[in-house]
Image: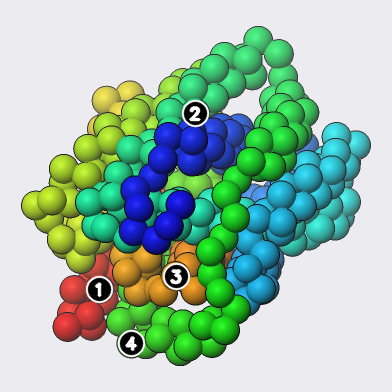
Amino acid sequence: MKPGESLNGSSERILKIQYFIYFGVMGIFLPYFNLYCHHLGFTSFEIGSLSALRTAITIVFSIVWSIVADRYAWRKPIYVLFNFLSAAIWVFFLYINNFSGMVIVTIFHTIFFAPLIAFIEAFAMDELGSGSGDKNRYGRIRAWGSVSFILVVFSLGKVSDLFSINTIVPLILAGYTLQAIFSIPMPKAKAREEQFHAGVRELLNARTLTFLTCSFLMIFSHGTYYGFYSIYLEELGYGPFFIGSTWAVASIAEIVIMINSGRILKYITLENVIFFSCLAASARWCLLWRAVTVTEIMIAQVLHAFTYGTFHVASILYMDLLSTGQTRTLGQAANNAVSYGLGMMAGFLLNGYLYEAYGARLFLMSASVSLAGAVVFRFLSR
């Protein structure tokens, strides 16, 4: 496909499959892996440390591998190879139930798993073409990942009720294996080596720094949610099926907003979407701080449409505007490393250290952090 052309049917199907499998596995990992570690007897600090270690490695290696991919136009071979390596290394989790062993395998697995989502986003931006109308279709394609996420978390909650939380490790392995197989038909990157350095210089500016600061604060505010939300609900007396259902409700809201993101972006600028998403996150964390009833919890989960759905779509498209075709992988990797890497690591570490002492009150801290992100983006971007 030549630059400027719209996404063809074959490329669209490939991208949908990639998003579907990747976020289906996330639907197992995010709600239940920390809970699995909790059932192994790990302390909250150990759980937070494992999550922080994973995201710290993501920061470094998503950037390193994206530079190599853009510099030499090796995005596809790296993507395919690392999918297979990630699946192979995950096998070791089947045999490990102690903290030190978990640390070692986590390090090696994350080294190769770290850049995969940034590569998928870069593939999508390449294949969607250069027009803003085509790029606004991104949300409809990305929504397939959210559909997969909701199907998995909803069904896995019931599976965990009937069987054991231990089933998540082999299920994740099966997902990684499928991801590796379906990575083979992904399209090749179009970046040219001789333009890479100029693209890097263009990417490094104050506007990019302001956006990345906001993105860091926004995802940092999610540390309590992603790290200890499921554990918090279990402590309130809710079972795995209900916990999975609340994650599913959040994903339904996310899907609805992503499918309609193209319409939204016709009337609201990317900058305003990012700003109001940060404000919505602050409101959501305040609600979860006091939420104990089913109604309160579900209302907070519906707000996921804005705290993740609109923010994610807008941030991917905004970073694409800041990048050139030759630094597209690097731009998405930088965004992923600073937000889901550095931001999530800071959130996991702080929450892992403080959760046993403060519990749900940490959601109030999260509200303050996302509000700071809104302020930074609104005023420093000017």
**Residue ranking furthest to the top:** 162
Q: Which residue is mark 3?
A: 325
Identify the secondary structure beneath mark 4.
helix
- Disc 2 on helix, strand or loop? helix
Whether residue 260 is visible? yes
Q: Residue furthest left?
A: 267
Q: Which mark is residue 206?
A: 4
Q: In front: mark 3 or mark 4?
A: 3
Q: Nearer the viewer, residue 17 or 376?
A: 17
**Residue 377, label in figure:** 1
Res. 50 in view: no
Q: Nearer the viewer, mark 3 or mark 1?
A: 3
Foreground: disc 1 or disc 2: 2
- Neighbour class for label 2 at 10 Å: few (<14), some, many (≥20)? many
Along the polypeptide, which appears first: circle 1 or circle 2?
2
Image point (31%, 53%), residue name: 135
Q: CA distance from mark 4 to mark 2?
A: 37 Å
Of the numbered discs 3 and 1, the one sitting upstream in the chain is 3
Q: Which mark is residue 148?
A: 2
